[in-house]
Amino acid sequence: MSDANKNSKEYKGSIFKLTPIDEDEVRKEIRALLVRDEYIAAAFRTVRDQLVFTNKRIISADIMGVTGARKTYTIMPYARILFFSIQTPGLTELIRDSELILTFANNSVITYQIEGGRNIYGIGQVISDYIL
C-alpha cells in the first residue's frame, strides 16, 4: 500500500476552522429551519459557511459556487453522536484555538477548530445534555 493510500485511510474526518459570530449574524435560512422551542446556543462561520449549535442539533450551511446561490444545509442530530472530545490550547501555544472532535454513529469524524476557544465548554455542555 502506498503512503498516500495509507494516510488517506487513517484520516477519517474533516477539519473546519471556525470564528465565533453573534446570533444576529446567523443566516435567515438557518433560522427558518429552527423548530418550536429550539434556540441558538452558539454560532460560528468560516469565510462564507456557518455552523450553528442549537439546544437540539447542529446545523451546517455550506455556501457553494462563485455567486453563493447553491447552498447545502446539513442537520446533525445530537442523538447520532457517539462521543466527542474537547481540546483546549496550552499556556505557551501561539495559536489559542480549541478543538471539538465529534464521532458519529456512522463512524464519521468531524473536527472543528474554534478560534480563541470561546464557547467550547458551553458547546460541550449542550452536546452532553443530549447524548448522555
Image (cartoon, helix red, strand yellow):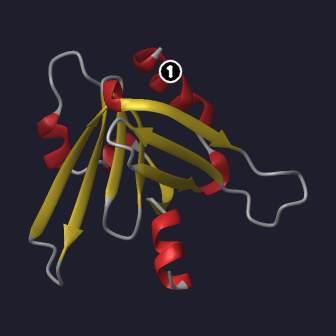
Residue 107 placement, left or right of 35: right
Residue 108 placement, left or right of 33: right
Residue placed most toward the observer, 98 or 24: 98
Q: Secondary structure at mark 1?
A: helix
The answer to whether residue 20 is seen in the rendering is no
Count of numbered labels shown in the rendering: 1
Vertical comparison of 119 with 48: above or below: above
Q: Residue at x 50, y 57 (%)?
A: 19
Residue placed most toward the observer, 38 or 111: 111
Residue that carries the numbered disc 1 in the rendered image: 128
Residue 68: image location, x then y, percent: 16, 73
Furthest-front residue in view? 1
Q: Residue at x 53, y 45 (%)?
A: 101
Residue 88: image location, x then y, percent: 72, 45
Residue 45: image location, x then y, percent: 40, 58
Residue 6: image location, x then y, percent: 52, 74
The answer to whether residue 67 is seen in the rendering is yes
Residue 13 placement, left or right of 58: right
Furthest-right residue in view? 92
Residue 71 placement, left or right of 50: left
Q: Residue at x 46, y 79 (%)?
A: 5
Q: Amino acid at mark 1?
A: Ser
Vertical comparison of 3 with 34: above or below: below
Q: Residues within 10 Å of mark 1 (few under 14, many from 20)?
A: some
Q: Residue at x 14, y 63 (%)?
A: 71
Vertical comparison of 7 with 15: above or below: below
